[in-house]
Image (tube, rainbow, N blue to C red):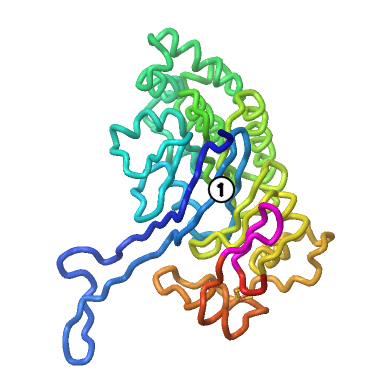
Amino acid sequence: MNTILKVKNLEQRFELDKGILGKIKFKNGKFVKEERIVRAVNDISFSVDKGKVFSLVGESGCGKSTTARTIIKLIEPKGGTVEFAGENITDLTRTEMLKYRKRMQMIFQDPYASLNSKQKVLNIITEPMLFHGVAASKSEAKEKALDILGKVGIRPEQATRYPHQFSGGQRQRIGIARALAVEPEFIIADEPVSALDVSIQAQILNLLMDLKKEYNFSYLFIAHDLSVVKHISDDLGVMYLGKIVEKGSKVNIFDNPLHPYTKALFSSVPKLSGTNLKNSKGIRGEIPSSINLPSGCYFHDRCPYAKQICMEKMPTEREVENGHFVLCHLY
Ligand code: SF4
């Protein structure tokens, strides 16, 4: 079996203004409770092959990070299924999820917020090792932790320091070491470089790729910047308002982007101005609220190619060429 993660028809939504009173409004002479639901992830499907990197890209607020948190069940899915290594993990309890938590790890955008500021780095790495039984004793855990820290570029004498004594880039290295500590097969990297200086971003991306070569991980990589995912991805999904509007191999999407939103994303990356995207029109307007999703195609009010049908009917996903899928009435 070549697939490590299979996500099918995944949905995530959040109710706002919960509680007895909720959001009460006075309408037509009476008080009514207004239900507001954020539809963050809307029926998405994709899979990640073993040893490969699948990247989800899109503007902030498009549902990428919520997708990641739903897959790893930090939030319970509201619909659809998640299969990991052939097992359906969608409805597992917290206890049942523990063995999968060891196999699936997450690297967060803000390494400082995700590290316990009261713990020394060595403890941050050894604690999950001991919890998940990766090391049988404290001394074995310490030896393994120092080895992992060395791999991510943290020296042994730095292991007794606290997270605040490190730079942003070093903290992200510690976050990566913590993920590696439990010997996972699959890593979700949620915007791991977007909080870092450009000069540090390349170092962290190179580190992630070197580690992938060494350990043969599979990655789900979340980013809003196409230039970040260009070098590391095997496959790509482009997200807009909780939908995957285009997915395929990196070559498919970088050489022949089809969806108007993907084209617009490319046109907003200055470095790519020499590609075949000269005619793309850029992204106009603001991303609509995921509380009041537009009718029809969610992109219609920003799309330069929108037709009447786009406002009325959500397109059906089509496979335009081998493994290259697009959600647009133009295809
Ligand atoms: Fe544009 Fe219509 Fe395609 Fe949506 S379905 S991206 S509005 S052309």
> In x, y percent, where is residue 205?
65, 38
Q: Residue at 55%, 21% (x, y): give it.
A: 149
Compared to 61, does 227 lie above or below?
above
> In the depicted view, which residue is nearer to us: 116 or 131?
131
**Residue 71 sits above or below residue 50 on the image:** below
- Density class for disc 1 (Cα within 10 Å; few <14, some 14-19, many ≥20) is many
Taking the magenta stretch, the answer to whether it contains residue 106 is: no
Residue placed under numbered mark 1 in the picture: 222
Report the amino acid beneath label 1: Ile
Residue 251, x across and y down, in percent: 74, 50
Q: Position of residue 252 (x, y in %)?
A: 73, 54
Q: Which quarter of the rendered image does ligand 1 occupy? A: bottom right
> Which residue is depicted at the point 43% across and 45% down?
82
**Magenta stretch: residue 324 in it?**
yes
State the residue at coordinates (53%, 31%). 176
Name the outermost residue toward the right: 274
Q: What residue appears at the point 56 percent right and 35 percent down from the top-left corner?
A: 167
Q: Does 237 sit above or below residue 38?
A: above
Q: Secondary structure at mark 1?
A: strand
Prevalent SS, magenta region:
strand
Residue span colored magenta? 317-327
Query: Viewed as shown, does residue 69 lie left or right of 262?
Result: left
Quadrant of image for the N terminus = top right
